[in-house]
Amino acid sequence: MPTESERTEEALAAHLQRMSGSIEQLSARIARLASALDVDLQNESELDRVLNMDGGGAPAHERRAAANSALPAGSPERRKSHLREELRGLLVLRYGVTRRFVDRVGVDATRHILVNAQDQLEREGFKPGAAGADLRRLFDGF
């Protein structure tokens, strides 16, 4: 019969596995969007441009209000605009999730989760750092 300590360890392991899966899925979507938009997220100026939406950001409009939009409904530029918005939102979301992970499980466990997610992307054929900065460098010193 499992002890309470063993059940706690199993629950923690399952929780960490779910956290890791979430980051892997989020990072994979970020990498796919960056690739589709030809954005190099390892380049600080491009990352900053995406996060600040200057130089090609999406026009402020309701998605369904095509008549009021500067871009025609269904146009390739409008589609790219929405993809840039999604990429920005997912990057911001990942930063927030990472911060919560650090608060919940600490820096070491969070580093492990993020680096494993990056390694998984590389195994799937993405170039190193496709979903953002090289996490190994980011966590050097911790």
Image (cartoon, rainbow, N blue to C red):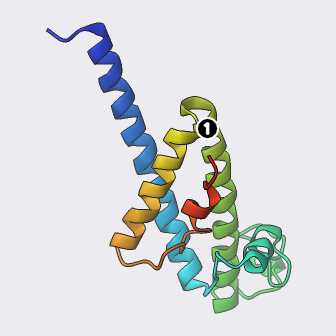
Where residue 81 appears, x then y in whole percent?
Answer: 71, 79
Q: Is residue 8 above or below residue 55?
A: above
Amino acid type at circle 1 is Val
Residue plotted at (75% across, 73% down): 50
Q: Is residue 3 above or below residue 22?
A: above
Instruction: Tell whether 107 sits left or right of 115.
Output: right
Residue plotted at (73% across, 88% down): 72
Residue plotted at (54% across, 32% down): 105
- Asked whether 86 or 142 is in front, the reply is 142
Where residue 53 appears, x then y in whole percent?
Answer: 81, 73
Q: Is residue 111 above or below residue 5?
A: below
Where residue 15 appears, x then y in whole percent?
Answer: 40, 33
How many numbered marks does the figure carry? 1
Helix, strand or loop at mark 1: helix
Q: Is residue 137 above or below residue 13?
A: below
- Asked whether 44 or 85 is in front, the reply is 44
Q: Residues within 10 Å of mark 1 (few under 14, many from 20)?
A: some
Instruction: Tell whether 135 sits left or right of 13.
Output: right
Q: According to the image, label 1 marks what residue?
A: 102
**Snapshot quadrant of residue 1:** top left
Furthest-front residue in this view: 141
Where residue 96 appears, x then y in whole percent?
Answer: 67, 47
Instruction: Tell whether 51 sits left or right of 90.
Output: right
